[in-house]
């Protein structure tokens, strides 16, 4: 295997022989991985504990990735930045698929579809459609220009350091936002696999990320991502197929998706009308009303609560109550908010949660309902329908355009040998991504069927062991409470986070724990592969574009690569620190990265390729305007960002568009600014205009 990675960097032998060697190596690798999983399954039957299975999966996969990184180490600039431009299209497609299959795609996609139903399809349509834009407008042309990075393209196409610098800043912003989400996913999966603390899990996973990208750059990352794709797609498909067979005896989940959705829809009607479910919802309504009363005068309510809690502790002690009861009462007293401000914040959150829980189906829309509201209802229902539909289309737009502009994805098309293979590579990327995205909607429905028909209605003392296990990892991801004290689980008594739908699928379906370990290893592979590509994008932007192109053009190759490695380490540690704070949910962070990339890069890239009149100052102003309006809209309207930046003004949504789709405003602003400013500024020099013409029309002779 080491020989194969050396050949990749040496440039010897034909591409055909190299591809044949790759086929052989990864064929053996896939077979070996299958044997490894079967061996672990046998050991589980012989009594190997879950903790050991988790540790073995974690250490074996991270060790494998680290091994590839060590064997692919290099100090050659072309190898480090673009893998020597020798990656065959099919393998670049697999690497791109892994680069793309982030924690959000692997962990969050099916969970989003589970929680939001039809509207979650916007993610699949947007992300998949984005690759059509990549194939049509960007990948082949960027490969013809031949630079190492997206800021490098902007610097060469538009001339001068300002477009390059803005490209660096935008690449760091969207890539850092995205990588924080991946490292959060790494911590979540590692803590579930091994039982270690979330924060420690982050740094364990970080070791695997760093060894690959630190030692071998794009060469190591490419071959690691191919290995990671094989693991993640196998890990994703096995439990879905198993669930499909368990429920329908058909091993093709995509084929039975419609039939299971009909059963889920029928069960939804039953759960909405179920007396026990209504009883639970009424209890939450009463809680919400009580909290609303407290919020009218938080200071008096807090004083009354403290007095009642102190009296209860005193009464229990006076009655010589059991120690456990006294301890529980003392804990309740200690858990009360410390002051009026804390009380107001805590009760506001609790009221919002109670309001959500007082809605049917645990505040989830009906799975098959296209949009909220009713186009044939009253004025309020029609407005809700139109806003919901508008947000659906806006999100698709942002994800499509953002996909086509993400720097870590576009960098992958610099690694293939030719423009033709760049086009083929996009096709293969779409195929490998399609395998997962075509399965995610079926997985969401199969899990919802399992929850509705098996979990709901089960006595609390007979709930599966995995419920308690996930509650230990993070109560916000999964918790159950017997609200109406009937010892039977109702749907609204369960809090379930979208991020665990995939990770818990194997356990939900009653599969052996080794399959749960495999799924977690797949999720880890997805998060690590994307994190590798993102960290490399940030480090390369700083070392190649900022240091080499702008600060020290005479720097040696070895110095540039060394600086890239040091910066990569610093950025990785910074991202790990931010992820350890558990900022916002994974899907928002990822979607924010797409809006940032769309607004910052897409207008400048497309106009730079297809309009030779686009000027450098226009591109710079367009990037600033597009990114600025997108960032402003997010900061003023997204709850977590409002808290970070201390925004207290009222939320004002434009046309009802949610902040997750802020790029829908930034992209047209970027296009408009670049076009208008280009028309009133001097045209680019003749050399740049001829270069643009030549890239679009290769047969055109340059003077």
Image (cartoon, rainbow, N blue to C red):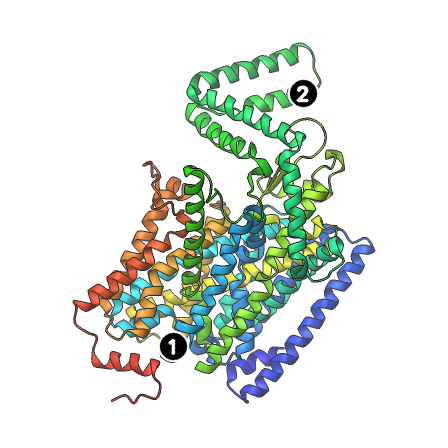
Look at the numbered disc 2 and give the secondary structure of its residue: helix
Seen from the viewer's position, the closer of residues 536 and 294 is 294
Q: How many marks?
A: 2
As drawn, the label of residue 141 is 1
Residue 166's tag is: none
Q: Residue at x 48, y 43 (%)?
A: 374
Marks 1 and 2: which is nearer the front? 1
Real-space Cα separation, disc 1 to disc 2, in angstroms: 71 Å
Q: Going by the picture, which residue comes out furthest to the front?
A: 376
Indicate whether 411 appears above or below 585: below
Q: Quadrant of residue 144?
A: bottom left
- Quadrant where the image shows the N terminus: bottom right
Q: In this view, does 188 lie to the left or right of 596?
A: right
What residue sits right under mark 2 in the picture? 325
| Quadrant in which the C terminus is drawn | bottom left
Query: With respect to residue 613, does 656 lie above or below?
Result: above
> Quadrant of the rendered structure where residue 439 is?
bottom right
């Amino acid at each position: 295997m080491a020989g194969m990675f050396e050949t990749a960097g040496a440039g010897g032998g034909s591409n055909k022989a190299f591809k044949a060697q790759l086929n052989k190596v990864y064929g053996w690798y896939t077979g070996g991985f299958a044997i490894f999983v079967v061996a672990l399954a046998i050991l589980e039957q012989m009594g190997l504990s879950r903790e050991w299975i988790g540790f073995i999966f974690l250490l074996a996969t991270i060790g494998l990735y680290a091994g590839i990184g060590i064997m692919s180490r290099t100090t050659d600039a072309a190898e480090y930045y673009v893998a020597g431009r020798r990656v065959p299209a099919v393998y670049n497609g697999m690497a791109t698929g892994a680069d793309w299959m982030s924690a959000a795609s692997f962990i969050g996609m099916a969970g989003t579809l589970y929680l939001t139903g039809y509207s979650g399809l916007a993610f699949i349509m947007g992300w998949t459609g984005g690759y059509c834009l990549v194939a049509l407008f960007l990948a082949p042309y960027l490969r013809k220009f031949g630079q190492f990075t997206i800021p490098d393209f902007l610097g060469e196409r538009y001339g001068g350091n300002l477009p390059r610098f803005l490209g660096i800043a935008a690449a760091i912003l969207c890539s850092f936002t995205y990588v924080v989400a991946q490292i959060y996913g790494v911590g979540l999966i590692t803590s579930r696999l091994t039982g270690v603390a979330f924060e420690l899990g982050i740094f364990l996973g970080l070791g695997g990320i760093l060894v690959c990208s630190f030692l071998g750059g794009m060469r190591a990352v490419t071959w690691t991502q191919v290995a990671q794709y094989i693991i993640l797609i196998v890990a994703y498909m096995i439990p879905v197929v198993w669930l499909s067979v368990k429920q329908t005896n058909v091993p093709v989940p995509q084929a039975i998706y419609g039939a299971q959705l009909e059963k889920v829809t029928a069960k939804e009607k039953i759960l909405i009308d179920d007396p026990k479910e209504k009883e639970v919802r009424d209890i939450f309504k009463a809680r919400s009303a009580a909290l609303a009363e407290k919020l009218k005068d938080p200071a008096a309510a807090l004083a009354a609560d403290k007095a009642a809690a102190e009296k209860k502790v005193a009464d229990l002690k006076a009655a010589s109550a059991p120690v456990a009861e006294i301890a529980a009462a003392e804990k309740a007293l200690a858990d009360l908010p410390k002051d009026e401000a804390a009380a107001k914040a805590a009760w506001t959150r609790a009221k919002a949660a109670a309001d959500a829980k007082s809605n049917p189906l645990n505040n989830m829309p009906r799975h098959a309902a296209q949009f909220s509201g009713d186009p044939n209802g009253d004025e309020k229902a029609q407005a809700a329908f139109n806003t919901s539909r508008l947000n659906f289309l806006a999100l698709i737009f942002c994800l499509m355009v953002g996909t086509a502009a993400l720097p870590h994805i576009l960098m992958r098309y610099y690694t293939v040998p030719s423009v033709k293979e760049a086009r083929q590579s996009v096709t293969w990327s779409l195929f490998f991504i399609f395998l997962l995205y075509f399965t995610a909607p079926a997985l969401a429905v199969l899990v919802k069927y399992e929850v509705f028909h098996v979990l709901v209605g089960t006595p609390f003392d007979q709930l599966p062991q995995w419920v308690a296990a996930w509650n230990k990892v993070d109560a916000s991801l999964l918790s159950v409470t017997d609200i109406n004290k009937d010892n039977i689980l109702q749907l609204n008594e369960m809090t379930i986070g979208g991020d665990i739908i995939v990770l818990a699928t194997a356990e939900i379906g009653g599969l052996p724990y080794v399959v749960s370990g495999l799924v977690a290893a797949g999720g880890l592979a997805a998060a690590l592969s994307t994190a590798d590509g993102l960290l490399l994008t940030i480090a390369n932007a700083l070392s190649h574009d900022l240091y080499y192109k702008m600060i020290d053009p005479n720097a040696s190759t070895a110095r540039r690569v060394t600086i890239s490695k040091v910066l990569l380490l610093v950025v990785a540690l910074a991202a790990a620190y931010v992820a350890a704070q558990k900022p916002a949910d994974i899907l928002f962070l990822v979607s924010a990265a797409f809006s940032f990339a769309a607004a910052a890069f897409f207008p400048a890239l497309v106009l730079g390729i297809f309009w030779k009149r686009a000027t450098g100052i226009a591109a710079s102003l367009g990037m600033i305007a597009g990114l600025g309006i997108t960032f402003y809209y997010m900061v003023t309207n997204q709850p977590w960002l409002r808290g970070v930046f201390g925004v207290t003004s009222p939320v004002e949504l434009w046309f009802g568009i949610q902040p997750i789709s802020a790029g829908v405003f930034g992209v047209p602003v970027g296009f408009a600014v670049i076009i208008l400013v280009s028309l009133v500024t001097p045209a680019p020099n003749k050399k740049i205009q001829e270069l643009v013409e030549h890239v679009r029309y290769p047969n055109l002779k340059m003077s």
